[in-house]
């Protein structure tokens, strides 16, 4: 896997908790909307909430579980792809890392 500069690894460790909170806030807004939908039955809403949490738990794992230097590049791609970094946060990574992330994303988008 791609090696990233030490500075970017440290930055990821700094930004990951911020991005995790941002992600959780997004999920909580989605959960609130589902719970507030009185046009459906409570059972239907429960099922939709269960499915949402199950899916988003997988997303959390992809982005935030097992942070190591050897997985950092993939984690940066996963967080950036899901728009959990602000533009300013992403711009703090080295030019080299940003270019590699964008290149990998374009390859995956074309696949």
Image (cartoon, grey):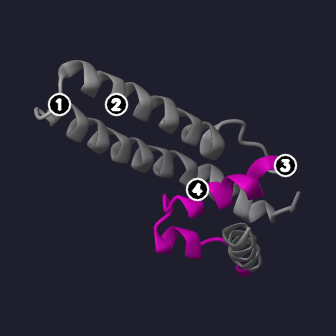
The span shown in magenta is 71-95
Q: How far separated are the C-alphas under marks 4 and 1?
A: 33 Å
Question: Percent x, y for residue 18?
Answer: 47, 50
- Counting residues from the start of the chain, the first of labels 1 and 3 encountered is 1
- Counting residues from the start of the chain, the first of labels 2 and 3 encountered is 2
Q: Disc 2 marks which residue?
A: 48
Question: Percent x, y for residue 67?
Answer: 71, 42
Give the quadrant of the C terminus. Answer: bottom right
Residue 53 magenta-highlighted: no
Q: Disc 1 marks which residue?
A: 40
Task: Characterize the local packing of mark 2: few (<14), some (14-19) or many (20 or more) Cα atoms within 10 angstroms.
Answer: some
Task: Characterize the local packing of mark 1: few (<14), some (14-19) or many (20 or more) Cα atoms within 10 angstroms.
Answer: few
- Counting residues from the start of the chain, the first of labels 4 and 2 encountered is 2
Q: How far separated are the C-alphas under marks 3 and 4?
A: 16 Å
Seen in the image, is 94 located left or right of residue 61?
A: right
Seen in the image, is 55 located left or right of residue 27?
A: right
Q: Disc 4 marks which residue?
A: 79
- Counting residues from the start of the chain, the first of labels 3 and 4 encountered is 3
Q: How far separated are the C-alphas under marks 1 and 3?
A: 45 Å
Q: Residue at x 81, y 65 (%)?
A: 5
Q: Are marks 1 and 2 in contact (CB under 8 Å)?
A: yes
């Amino acid at each position: 896997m791609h090696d990233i500069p030490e500075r970017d690894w440290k930055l990821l460790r700094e930004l990951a908790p911020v991005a995790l909170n941002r992600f959780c806030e997004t999920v909580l807004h989605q959960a609130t909307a589902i719970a507030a939908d009185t046009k459906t039955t409570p059972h239907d809403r429960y099922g939709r909430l269960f499915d949402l949490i199950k899916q988003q738990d997988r997303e959390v794992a992809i982005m935030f579980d097992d942070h190591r230097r050897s997985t950092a590049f993939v984690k940066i791609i996963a967080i950036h792809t899901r728009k959990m970094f602000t533009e300013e946060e992403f711009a703090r990574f080295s030019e080299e890392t940003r270019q590699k992330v964008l290149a990998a994303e374009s390859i995956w988008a074309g696949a």
